[in-house]
Amino acid sequence: MLPGRDWSVSSVAISPDGTRALTGSIDGELKLWDIVAGKQLRSWLGHERGAYGAVFLADGNHAVTGSGDYTIKLWDLDTFKEVRRFEGHSGTVYALALSADGKRLGSVSLDGTARIWNMDTGAEIAEFDPGTGPMYAVAFAADGTLLTGGIDRAIRDWPAAGGDGTVLFAGAPE
């Protein structure tokens, strides 16, 4: 167990080489951990509200976090500085996913939308709004489409370039 949490842990990501972890808490604090040594390497206030969703990039030196302050931030884990900000959501950014090639970021929010972002520029590539309420889960499929899940209990498949989604699995009846 890693000590040192003052608030509930709301996100965790493991580096590609498995040696470090990035955790976020509901107060917006981010902590980088050395898993092998079991010690905290650094702590910083990354967001003004809770940090939800965390993903390491393939290089292991950068990570992305989402937040209750409605932002997504790309961090340099050598300097602990914000490299890029992705803005557009109007609710807590609840979960994040990185495409297999690392060029696109998927996000879902309590604002009921999913978005795809360009990792190099921070520009929004596509926005999806099924009109069904908050979204809690996101992943990229092997073909590059975005899969989302939310309060309506349905899993949707969204085209990589934007457009209408397809319900893959409908939520269980009430």
Image (spheres, rainbow, N blue to C red):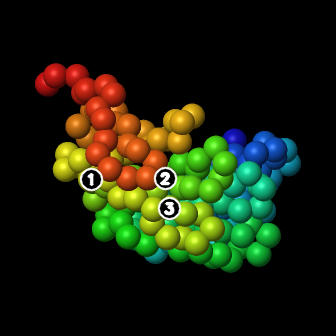
Compared to residue 58, the image places residue 151 above or below, namely above
Camera-side residue of 59 and 42: 59
Q: Is residue 1 left or right of residue 126?
A: right
- Which residue shows up at 54% across the image and 55% down it? 105
Q: Which mark is residue 129?
A: 1
Q: Residue 134 location in percent, x, y?
A: 27, 50
Q: Which mark is residue 117?
A: 3
Q: Pointers 3 and 1 in contact (CB under 8 A)?
A: no
- Which residue shows up at 25% across the image and 26% down it? 170
Residue hosting label 2: 106
Camera-side residue of 130 and 162: 162
Hey, what amino acid is under mark 3? Trp
Camera-side residue of 55 and 34: 55
Figure label count: 3
Please tell me in which quadrant of the rendered image residue 159 appears.
top left
**Dot 2 surroundings within 10 Å: few (below 14), some, or many (20 or more)?**
many
SS type, badge 3: strand
- Which residue shows up at 24% across the image and 27% down it? 171
Q: Pointers 2 and 3 in contact (CB under 8 A)?
A: yes
Cα distance between the residues tagged 3 and 1: 15 Å
SS type, badge 1: loop
- Which residue shows up at 29% across the image and 45% down it? 164
Q: Quadrant of the N terminus?
A: top right
Q: Is residue 129 left or right of residue 108?
A: left
Cα distance between the residues tagged 2 and 3: 6 Å
SS type, badge 2: strand
Compared to residue 157, the image places residue 54 above or below, namely below
